Amino acid sequence: MFVIIGWAVSMACIFGVFIAHGGNIGVILHALPFEMITIFGAAIGAFLANNQMKVVKATAAGLGRCFKGSKYSKARYMELLALMYDILQKARKEGLMSIEKDVEDPHSSPLFQKYPVVGNDHHVTEFITDYLRMMVSGNLNAHEIESLMDSEIETHHQEEHAAVAALQRLAGGLPAFGIVAAVLGVVNTMGSVGQPPAVLGGMIGSALVGTFLGILLAYGFAEPLAGLLEQKVEDGGKEFQCIKTTLLASMQGYAPQVAIEFGRKVLFSGDRPSFSELESHVKKK
């Protein structure tokens, strides 16, 4: 929603001021289709040439996420930490082997299905169950698991950030493609030097629209989307860090109530539930 509002404000200010100063919007509208096809076609072709198909797909999926609200909220994190509390509390009371069935089949586990917001998230449940399985096996210590978690989170971050980098490269190339479109317009104008000055002026104006569009698309559209997607990637990584911190605290001997407090502390302040909010939610569940 805010993406559309931001674009609307930008376009209203840019074109509104242009018209208010006596600019002829007809020149821009006349050149717009041809310049857009040139710039967009070149940009899409370069984008496909510059990225593997998995990055292209990830970018398309990421653009879709930019127009949706963030799923990472205080309510989601309270569900996550309550789930972690229940799992660790069961393991503490009944032994690690008691959660083996929950770990092997989380989709049938009453613990995971009690919290459907995170229990039905494939990436979250896989991350949790993989490391719980290692804890149940008892073959790795906390330092080894922490190192493995860091490696997995870093890999996940790199995969997610590939789409961000692709959009940033696209934004960097759009002004150049705008110049290409403008140069082609100037070449076309130079081939019509016998025309009256009014016609030549219109042709030159149309050519300059290419430069204008390239810069506008880069810094008004592509770059903001890349920045927004990067923020969403950081939000996703923070959830894994919360799980990691909670599990490691449990492995080091802290009680479940204290372990989830470790996890709560790593969350961004805007999404972090307070101690009393989390405690009340856990007790209610």
Image (cartoon, helix red, strand yellow):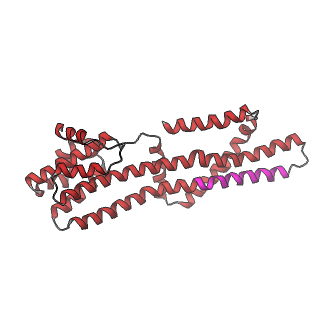
Q: Quadrant of residue 172?
A: bottom right
Q: With 65 as the anchor, is 101 left or right in this view? A: left
Q: Quadrant of the C terminus?
A: top left
Q: Quadrant of residue 139?
A: bottom left
Q: Residue at x 11, y 53 (%)?
A: 92
Q: Nearer the viewer, residue 191 or 249?
A: 249
Q: Nearer the viewer, residue 110 or 48?
A: 110
Q: Is residue 183 magenta?
A: yes
Q: What secondary structure is the magenta-colored segment mainly?
A: helix
Q: Position of residue 214 (x, y in %)?
A: 66, 49
Q: Is residue 83 magenta?
A: no
Q: Nearer the viewer, residue 9 or 49?
A: 9
Q: Residue at x 60, y 57 (%)?
A: 46
Q: Position of residue 81 (x, y in %)?
A: 24, 46
Q: In this picture, which residue range is highlighted in magenta?
A: 171-190
User: In the image as oriented, which residue stretches furthest toward the left?
Assistant: 94
Q: Residue at x 76, y 33 (%)?
A: 22
Task: Count every numbered label the image shows and give the total.
Answer: 0
Q: Position of residue 137 (x, y in %)?
A: 16, 64
Q: With 163 as the anchor, is 112 left or right in this view? A: left
Q: Residue at x 66, y 38 (%)?
A: 14
Q: Position of residue 219 (x, y in %)?
A: 60, 48
Q: Nearer the viewer, residue 79 or 56?
A: 79
Q: With 70 as the anchor, is 252 left or right in this view? A: left
